[in-house]
Image (cartoon, rainbow, N blue to C red):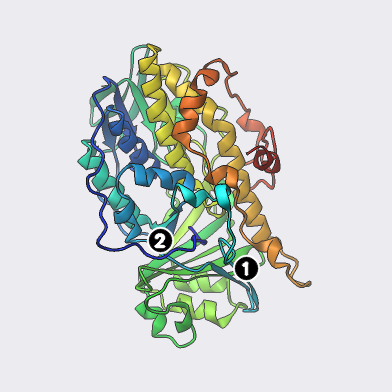
């Protein structure tokens, strides 16, 4: 979820995004995308703006309101503006003044603001050209689906891909006994992706992350009805608060000017991994993890409506040695390629970067008269190391919150969420155009996944350069 938001007010409700950009001139490229998550929809929208034809398969019947909110940071927010949905999405966003930190026993630690009052970041300000959107998963999904359909993306809901197929001159998927063909197939089907098997050549089973999340959202009126926690949900404003404890943290936030709220509890979990990794949650189970915590936390949990809680097992897979099949016509993106810890606050943004990079790599390859399988390999080369550095931030943020010595006074700077300008200032489209030719001759990425620990369990990822080096070079 997005815990920090830039200091800004809600937009004028009379402003609109009209006229929206139209699809580009036909490119002659046909794309199949599997999975209507954020990465898949981002790729579909950008591909239509580039003139590619897109058919998208999604196995769910419909998207339902789920869990908590989600943040699109400036590195992905710039594309929301490009797609012509800036004002529409902004109207569903939250505008808190920062994040208030507490110890698990209720002791106040600090108020983390995105930008200090009066501080001028100058040309380094990532919000100068691209916004941050702190919205709900449901609102974002609905808007992306609407925009994709407006642009002519064919979205087939309630369709399950049974098989991925790849030949020298096409890639395809089999659905209900019918083979659908395209120039490329993109697996954006999440951490349980079937496309991974084709890309790797073998099945890789999911592994436990060691953590799980209870998550929910509902009307903030229920919070305001309880005097113990009513101060967390004032009307006409949005707020974010976090409590940190041994191997756990609890976040509550309001959105839409205090009308809606969400909370989540991240905690250690020793459950066996199953492919079905999201379950109905029980409030009494969540309360067991915070029985010695601040009464405010317990009061919030007790306002949860029956049936509204989800128990989300953080299932991860080992880092892939590659994201593209040997034939180069099938690839994975987003969580199917690189699952992120929620503490990275970059999972959605990096999926968007994947999607727009693929759309433009295909366009460039076509214009240069290159085989389209070259484009997907360029995508992998451009994205691989950047993604691993972004994943490391999630590991670092989690460790900052969960590995605190509570026998000593807490240093506020030591626990606050970390962000990096090298992440936020990045323009994936510009990067693709500037570096396509060099990526053509770059050595193929081939990290041995078998020697790398799961992202969720590692304290440090095996990356060529540490995050600090990447920041220094930005």
Q: Is residue 318 something that shows in the picture?
A: no
User: For this rendering, which residue is in front, 474 or 242?
Assistant: 474
Relative to 106, is 122 above or below?
above
Within-10-Å neighbours for mark 1: few <14, some 14–19, many 20+: many
Looking at the image, do the residues carrying marks 2 and 1 touch, with CB atoms under 8 Å apart?
A: no
Relative to 412, is 164 above or below?
above
Relative to 408, is 79 above or below?
above
Which residue is denoted by mark 1 in the rendering?
244
Residue 452 in which image quadrant: top right
Q: Between marks 2 and 1, how big is the CA–CA gap?
A: 20 Å
x, y percentage for residue 230?
A: 45, 83
Q: Name the residue rendered at 41%, 29% in the picture.
A: 358
Q: Tell me which label, 2 or 1, sits earlier in the chain.
A: 2
Q: How many marks?
A: 2
User: For this rendering, which residue is in front, 251 or 64?
Assistant: 251
Which residue is denoted by mark 2 in the rendering?
67
x, y percentage for residue 304?
A: 40, 74
User: For this rendering, which residue is in front, 383 or 180?
Assistant: 383
């Amino acid at each position: 979820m997005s815990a920090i938001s830039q200091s800004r007010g809600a937009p004028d409700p009379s402003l609109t995004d009209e006229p929206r950009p139209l699809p580009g001139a036909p490119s002659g490229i046909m794309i199949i995308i599997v999975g209507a998550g954020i990465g898949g929809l981002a790729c579909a929208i950008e591909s239509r703006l580039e003139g590619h034809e897109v058919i998208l398969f999604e196995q769910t019947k419909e998207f339902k309101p789920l869990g908590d909110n989600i943040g699109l940071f400036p590195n992905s927010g710039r594309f929301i503006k490009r797609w012509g949905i800036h004002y529409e999405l902004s109207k569903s966003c939250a505008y808190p003044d920062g994040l208030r930190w507490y110890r698990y026993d209720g002791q106040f630690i600090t108020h983390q603001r995105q930008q200090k009052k009066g501080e001028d970041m100058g040309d380094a300000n990532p919000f100068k050209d691209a916004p941050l959107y702190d919205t709900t998963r449901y609102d974002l999904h609905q808007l992306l689906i609407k925009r994709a359909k407006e642009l002519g993306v064919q979205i087939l809901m309630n369709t399950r891909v049974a098989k991925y197929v790849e030949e020298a001159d096409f890639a395809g998927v089999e659905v209900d006994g019918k083979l659908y063909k395209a120039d490329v197939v993109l697996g954006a089907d999440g951490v349980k992706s079937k496309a991974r098997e084709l890309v790797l050549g073998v099945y890789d089973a999911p592994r436990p992350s060691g953590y799980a999340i209870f998550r929910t959202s509902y009307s903030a009126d229920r919070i305001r009805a309880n005097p113990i926690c009513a101060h967390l949900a004032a009307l006409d404003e949005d707020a974010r608060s976090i409590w940190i404890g041994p191997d756990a943290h609890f976040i509550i936030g309001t959105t839409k000017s205090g009308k809606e709220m969400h909370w989540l509890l991240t905690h250690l979990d020793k459950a066996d991994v199953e492919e079905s990794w999201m379950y109905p949650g029980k409030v009494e189970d969540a309360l067991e993890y915070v029985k010695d915590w601040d009464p405010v936390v317990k009061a919030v949990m007790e306002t949860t409506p029956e049936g509204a809680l989800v128990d989300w097992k953080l299932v991860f897979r080992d880092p892939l040695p590659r994201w593209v099949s040997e034939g180069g016509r099938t690839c994975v993106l987003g969580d199917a390629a690189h699952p992120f810890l929620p503490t990275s606050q970059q999972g959605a943004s990096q999926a968007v970067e994947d999607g727009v990079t693929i759309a433009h790599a295909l366009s460039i390859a076509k214009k240069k008269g290159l085989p389209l399988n070259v484009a997907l390999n360029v995508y992998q080369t451009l994205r691989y190391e950047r993604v691993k550095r972004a994943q490391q931030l999630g590991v670092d943020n989690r460790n900052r919150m969960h590995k605190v010595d509570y026998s000593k006074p807490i240093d506020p700077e030591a626990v606050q969420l970390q962000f990096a300008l090298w992440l936020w200032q990045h323009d994936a489209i510009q990067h693709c155009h500037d570096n396509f030719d060099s990526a053509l001759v770059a050595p193929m990425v081939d990290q041995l996944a078998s020697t790398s620990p799961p992202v969720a369990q590692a304290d440090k990822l095996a990356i060529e350069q540490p995050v600090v080096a990447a920041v220094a070079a930005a």
